[in-house]
Image (cartoon, grey):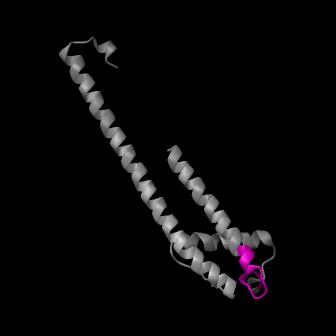
Amino acid sequence: MVRLAGLLLAIVICLHIIACFWYLVGDADGGWVITFELEGAADGYIVALHWALTLMQGTMWSTTPLTIWERLFSVIILPIALVFTALFVGSTTMLMQQSTNFARDLAKQRSALTTVARHYKFPPDLCV
């Protein structure tokens, strides 16, 4: 569970960094921040974070790159985001498999202990 929380924290940090850079790149003349006529940095950050979240899915939301720097950033970050998403899915699958294996091993050990307790006729209050 701790590993999964650490993995989720890493994703949130990466999304934050991507969103900040997307906002920084889009805040130039002719960029998406000016085109959307956003009220302040908080509104821009929310839009940028939404863009970063959709990027992790392998798609790009309707905030399309308008300047060459936005396009370059998108081209560079999209494969990185796809790899990061694949690593997240793979790591989550591995953690769930390890959890299942641990539960199975624990059940086998309990069954073995129960068998030993019955064979040697341990008192029931000792076999909790």
Q: Is residue 28 magenta?
A: yes
Residue 116 lies, in percent from the top left, at 22, 20
Residue 102 shown left or right of residue 111 in the figure: right
Quadrant of res 108? top left
**Image quarter hosting the C terminus:** top left
At 62% from the left and 74% from the top, the residue drawn is 51
Q: In this picture, is 81 found above or below 103? A: below
Residue 30 lies, in percent from the top left, at 76, 88
Number of numbered callouts drawn: 0
Magenta stretch: give its range. Answer: 23-34
Q: In this picture, is 126 found above or below 62? A: above
Residue 28 shown left or right of residue 65 in the figure: right
At 27% from the left and 23% from the top, the residue drawn is 113
Q: Is residue 10 magenta?
A: no
Residue 112 shown left or right of residue 43 in the figure: left
At 51% from the left and 47% from the top, the residue drawn is 3
Quadrant of res 93? bottom left
Residue 73 shown left or right of residue 58 in the figure: right
Q: In this picture, is 14 found above or below 121? A: below
